[in-house]
Image (cartoon, rainbow, N blue to C red):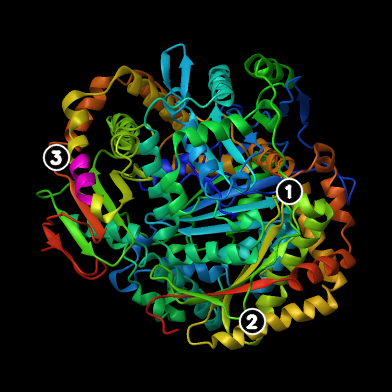
Amino acid sequence: MNRLGLAFLGALLLWSGAVRAASPERVNSPGGITAWLMPDPTSPKIAVALAFRGGRAADPWDGIGLSDLALETLMQGVGDLDRRALLGRMADLTASVWVSAGVHWLSFDFTIVKERQRESIDLLHQMLAVPHPTDERIERASFNVMGDINGAVRDPAQLATLALRRAIAPDNPVLRAWLPIMAAVDHPSRARLEEWYRTRFAKDEVLIGVGGSITVAELGPMLDRLFAGMPDHGTARAVPELEPAIAGNPLVLVPRSEGETSIAALALGPIIGDPDYVAFAALNEVFGADVLNSRLGTQLRERRGLTYGISSELERNQLIVSGTVAHKDAAQAIATLREVWPEIGRDGITAAELATAKRRLRENFAPTRPANSLDAAEQMLFFQERGLDEHWNSAILSAIDALTADDVKRVAKRVLGPAPLAISLVGQPVGITPTCTIANPLIDRCK
Amino acid sequence: MNLSILTAPGTPLPRLMLVLAALIWSNTALAELPIATRVLSNGLQLIVIPDQHAERLNLGIWYKVGAADEVDGKTGLAHYTEHLMFRSTATTEGGVANSSAALQADNNAYTSADRTVYTDNVTRAELAGVLAIESQRMRALVVPNGGDTELKVVQAERRWRYDTRPSALLRLQADAALFAGHVYARPAIGTPEDIARLTVQDSVDFHARWYAPNNAVIILGGAISPDEAFELLERAFSDLPAKAIPSRDWPTSEIHGSVGKEPLRVADPHRPGRSFAREFIGPSYGTGGPRSVFATKILLQALIDDANGELPRALEDRRRLVEQTVGHYEPAHLGPGDFSLTAYMRPGADLVSAEEALDFVLQQTISQGVPADLVEILKKRWIDRERYAEDDATATATEIGEFITSGGTLEQYHHRLEEIAAVTPADVAAVARQILGGPSILLEIRNSDVKG
């Protein structure tokens, strides 16, 4: 199993409970489908979290955005039910569906009422295994996806991150998947979409987590009903991680008429599964995850009042800083960022910082009881998406316990400096000397 | 006025969701989370929502003070005070630190017109320490340094949230017009001129006037027994003195809605395409009580529900003028609530025709109400969602907090499902006449590249 997945900590933070009460069970259906189950017989609901391998990053160069379009089209109608009839039917069943095309995974969350299981699963089966993309549904979906894209390309914060990623690794398929240039979405063809469903929705491409009021014996037949008729094999490809290759210290400027300057900065570290991953996650906590008390927050917000919010987050192996400042303060903010950046690699962290980081990591990694059935289902999926076994939680807890300040310093030295720091700015910052200026990060890139 | 303002960006509180589960409608009743309450002799109300699913505890300190309690010339003071609470000195086992550093836990706060809320997400082991800090900053605001820097942070927040976003500024302008004459007309975050003049002493005085045990509610949800919770809460808060709290009687009769015929218009480079919105004054828990709020929620669904709403059918399907219709209703206020409908235009469609089509549907709703069978369908779906909802102490705590600080009682809260079931088509028709027939304001937002 590969180790691709959604934004790691982002996904983790969605957890508000977790895994002590019961331990997960692997269930194999009579039809050969495997799911991980965390049952809760007291719940009135059943939740299923699915992910098909190979998200947007597996779309071809001339079909970027097909994933978004395909999933959005599913929501426009099922069988003979048009969109409104579908939504009405789901409301009557108290069922909910959430879909998302991620970079690496195509995700579905279903929550249904146990008492209405049969009708609900029949509806979801039709949606998933018998997609019915009429021209009208595709057109409506295209409108919606283009609307999202048009919003995204006008958001200076998203533009700043995009400019940065393109400056670092313009040809990487993962970065390509972030490009909101989705010509395929604007000129959708029904045949192409039908082919997409045939090749991407397959039994051997899906991982399944289940939670709520269902037993091992009941789950197998339910899964077989849900996936009946779906092809056995798909063709999604694994997508490589970003290669750590930041050359020089690029400072990319995107001049735009904005009310303030958006800043993004990026560094590359180890991916989950690497022995240093926990130290990397701890580094992110100390460096910038907390808007108020991290190194970044303390220096830029608490001491200098330069920003309402600047913070860092991990997205797989990328540590990404983002925030906004007044145009006139941009130079001071960048100077401060450059000053703070290598500090941890040079001087290490304090005992108090280590303790806080461990505490926050335990919070993130060691939820102990699922808050609800969907939470349980998502946890079960989470393990599988990352190629981890059921014992991963306790393994990572031991790693957090064993973590030392020196580990964090060592990883910081590698990730934050003297390694190069890539920065991008969108707006009209004062007193900045960029290494490269581009008009439109969707099209241009630094030479 | 309705935008809550968080101390730290990016961590919104859980959305308001009615999470209940009591009987009604069928005999397959589910057990509701048991809610325990107690009032200390200093007037502090405690509410505990035990939930074994929530191992981490959710602590909320709800103060009955907000931007609506400011005086002219000091707008933004409630919010600045909330920010300074994180710089207020706290003594812990580790020594003296500011509250933000001392709390450590996952914490945040927000200020709205009606309330100021501080939340901490804590383990059982951390609870006593966090309560001790919350108790110290309830007693007094002590900010020996950094107050000026925090004012710059608040100014940066105002810039980030409003001044760099033309459509957000337009909403402030709309509130100012629609609620003219009422304290809700003022922006909760404050005007740039007022914010620039705020001082730490202003906040210390504001805190002294409003922050008191008898002007707060503490709600604790999660895996803890009521007895244990009450003991810890009493130990931390029982020696705080009660204070005389000023009146919060904001006259609503003064609202004169200086709404002209011309729409408010803005071009926003961050918003794609074109949209328009009509904003109305709605009932709130404070002004109308639960029945009228629930009738209004059904009215909103009858208008905008994707499956059955009249506006999507008329504007999106029949006329194909609009791509999406959405609605917003915020009843968690002591004063009037707000009710708005927004339509996102299809590219190339005629804006005036769409506005007229929306107004036509609203006129029809005023004169004919909502069909009785649709009211029944929407009620049944709503009650089903509640019946089949899973326990969620955090969502329950948020709902109770908003309800109680909007003038509701726990007793009313316990009976809300009966109240939903009792809503009649006549109730819905009555709120439709009241809201849609009252003053309203039209907003038009377009991307800067789209021709006006």
First to last magenta residue range = A330-337
**Residue A18 screen position, x and y as percent:** 55, 33
CA separation, marks 1 and 3?
53 Å
- Visible in this render: residue A24? no
Q: Residue at x 83, y 48 (%)?
A: B417
Q: In the image shown, does A8 or B224 lie closer to the viewer? A: B224
The verdict on residue A335 being magenta is: yes
Chain for mark 1? Answer: A
Label 2 residue SS: helix
Q: Could you tell me how many numbered marks the image carries?
A: 3
Q: In which quarter of the image is the N terminus of chain B?
A: bottom right
Chain for mark 3? Answer: A
Q: In this view, does B243 lie above or below B298?
A: above
What residue is shown with label 2? B315
| Residue type at numbered disc 3 | Ala
- Visible in this render: residue B258? yes
CA separation, marks 3 and 2?
55 Å
The verdict on residue A271 being magenta is: no
What residue is shown with label 1? A114
In the picture, the disc for residue B182 is: none
Q: Nearer the viewer, mark 1 or mark 3?
A: 3
Picture quadrant of residue B187 = bottom right
Picture quadrant of residue A217 = top right
For marks 1 and 3, the one nearer the N-term is 1
What residue is shown with label 3? A419
Q: Nearer the viewer, mark 1 or mark 2?
A: 2
Left or right for B269, reference A172:
right
